[in-house]
Amino acid sequence: MKKALFVLSTLALLTACDQDAKSPAKPAPPSVQATLVPETPPTDKWIGQWIGVEGLHLTIAKDDSIGRGHYLLTMQYGLDAEDAGTFKGEAAEDGIAFTRPDGPQSLRAGDGAATGLKWLADKKDCLIVATGEGYCR
């Protein structure tokens, strides 16, 4: 009788363990998930001043009024006085997405050669909007 009881309890334990292994993983509670998301997006490393050619420049600041991953881009992006302004940007998969009068733009990391500007060709730490428009440190 004791052997039968022992065998049955062992089977019950093994069955319970097997069911736990087959059950799908439950997502972490929101409080734990919040700690798994990086506190600072990679684009936060871009905050500060960047220099282009012929007086072009870019300053990136956090837009704390909106929240994490939002930026204010103050830039002189063309040679004419009206080619300047401050634009709201948002962290995107490959950089910072923003819109200015010449349309939607994306700011992405690269080197001086990727800017297409010979004056920046030897730089290593640059941000590029398009070929011919880049800013480096």
Image: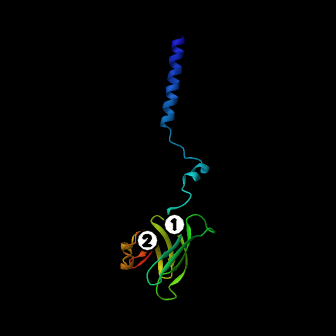
> Image point 60% across, 70% down: which residue?
63
Amino acid on which disc 1 is placed: Ala
Under circle 2, the secondary element is strand
Does 33 appear above or below 123?
A: above
Q: Which residue occupies the foreground of this view, 11 or 28?
A: 28
The percent coordinates of residue 9 (x first, y second) are 54, 20
Residue most extreme to the top: 1
Does 108 appear above or below 20?
A: below
Under circle 1, the secondary element is strand
The percent coordinates of residue 33 (x first, y second) are 57, 51
> Image point 51% across, 14% down: which residue?
4
Quarter of the N terminus within the rendering: top right
The percent coordinates of residue 116 (x first, y second) are 36, 77
> Image point 50% across, 17% down: which residue?
7
**Mark 2 lies on residue:** 126
> Image point 51% across, 42% down: which residue?
25
Q: What is the number of the mark on residue 91?
A: 1
Q: CA distance from mark 2 to mark 1?
A: 17 Å
Packing grade of label 1 (10 A; few <14, some 14-19, many >=20) is some
